[in-house]
């Protein structure tokens, strides 16, 4: 778990806190975590990236905010470098992408996601647009505004349900389902901060605007169902992140801690 006070590891029933005072974690303010194919943990913070192999800590980047990370199918790690675009690291060398070299429309990336065909998707932090990279071409897509009288903000989450179906969230507008050609909107006017798809294909969306209900909602392909502090055991309605383990259990990060929803 990434927190504002370091990194917490839960191994069965035991918790371990890693911070800059007891490890070489580059900063205690953790924004994102990715695990590569060799079980290496990559920790993105407000001051760079730390790499942890279970024993040793290594600093890969310093003095930069890393808001999002992802590992692609070739085990390349992708980092968003706030204000400077993207960095791809293959384990040996680094390659940068930005608006300066024509790859991205802007240098502020809020989310990175990898689909089943190893396409890399990037969400713009401030504008309602996503860019897909197929390792040859860069294509930027913009969803239609369902309410032209109200402006749309940047992308907060990207997930994939089924081959070729990208789920793309724009806060206070809703979740769009994009098949590469057409856009369909679901869960309208919802401010979702995070999305995840479980092994059964159920979508899980976490809210970060409490006055719209808060909590998490699940979608089985036909119906949305909301879970909040009033009707479930979730610890808080302000949801910041969702992770799904190999058993299909949902781990819900909130403003007041973590809830586990067992499959």
Image: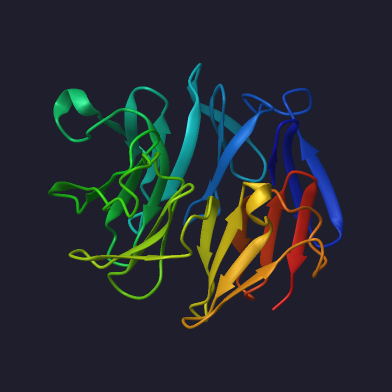
Q: Quadrant of residue 85?
A: top left
Q: Is residue 223 left or right of residue 77?
A: right
- Say above or below: 203 vs 98: below
Q: Quadrant of residue 22?
A: top right
Question: Which residue: 51% across, 16% down?
Answer: 63
Quick one: 84 or 35, which is closer to the camera?
Answer: 84
**Residue 1: image x %, image y %?**
69, 47
Quadrant, the C terminus: bottom right
Question: Which residue: 72% across, 29% down?
Answer: 23
Quick one: 117 or 167, which is closer to the camera?
Answer: 167
Q: Is residue 113 left or right of residue 223?
A: left
**Residue 260: image x %, image y %?**
75, 64
Q: Is residue 239 visible?
A: no
Quick one: 78 or 176, which is closer to the camera?
Answer: 176
Residue that extends furthest to the top in the rendered view of this protein: 63
Q: Is residue 97 left or right of residue 244?
A: left
**Residue 103: image x %, image y %?**
18, 35
**Residue 78: image x %, image y %?**
38, 42
Q: Is residue 255 visible?
A: yes
Question: Which residue: 62% across, 46% down?
Answer: 209
Question: Which residue: 31% across, 74% down?
Answer: 163
């Amino acid at each position: 778990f990434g927190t504002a006070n370091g990194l917490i590891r839960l191994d069965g029933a035991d918790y371990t806190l890693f911070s800059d005072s007891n490890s070489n974690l580059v900063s205690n303010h953790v924004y994102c975590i990715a695990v590569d194919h060799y079980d290496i943990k990559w920790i993105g913070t407000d001051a760079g990236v730390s790499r942890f192999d279970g024993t040793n800590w290594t600093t890969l980047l310093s003095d930069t905010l890393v808001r999002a990370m992802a590992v692609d199918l070739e085990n390349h790690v992708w980092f968003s470098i706030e204000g400077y675009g993207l960095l791809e690291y293959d384990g040996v060398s680094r390659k940068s992408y930005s608006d300066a070299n024509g790859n991205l429309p802007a240098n502020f990336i809020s989310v990175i996601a990898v689909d089943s065909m190893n396409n890399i998707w990037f969400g713009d932090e401030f504008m309602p647009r996503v860019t897909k990279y197929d390792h040859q071409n860069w294509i930027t897509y913009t969803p239609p505004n369902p309410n032209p009288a109200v402006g749309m903000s940047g992308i907060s989450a990207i997930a994939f349900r089924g081959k070729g179906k990208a789920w793309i969230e724009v806060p206070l507008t809703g979740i769009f389902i994009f098949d590469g050609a057409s856009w369909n909107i679901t869960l309208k006017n919802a401010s979702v901060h995070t999305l995840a798809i479980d092994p059964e294909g159920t979508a899980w969306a976490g809210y970060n605007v409490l006055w719209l209900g808060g909590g998490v909602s699940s979608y089985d392909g036909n119906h949305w169902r909301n879970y909040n502090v009033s009707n479930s055991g979730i610890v808080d309605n302000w949801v910041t992140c969702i992770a799904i383990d190999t058993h299909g259990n949902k781990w819900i990060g909130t403003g007041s801690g973590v809830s586990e929803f067992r499959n």
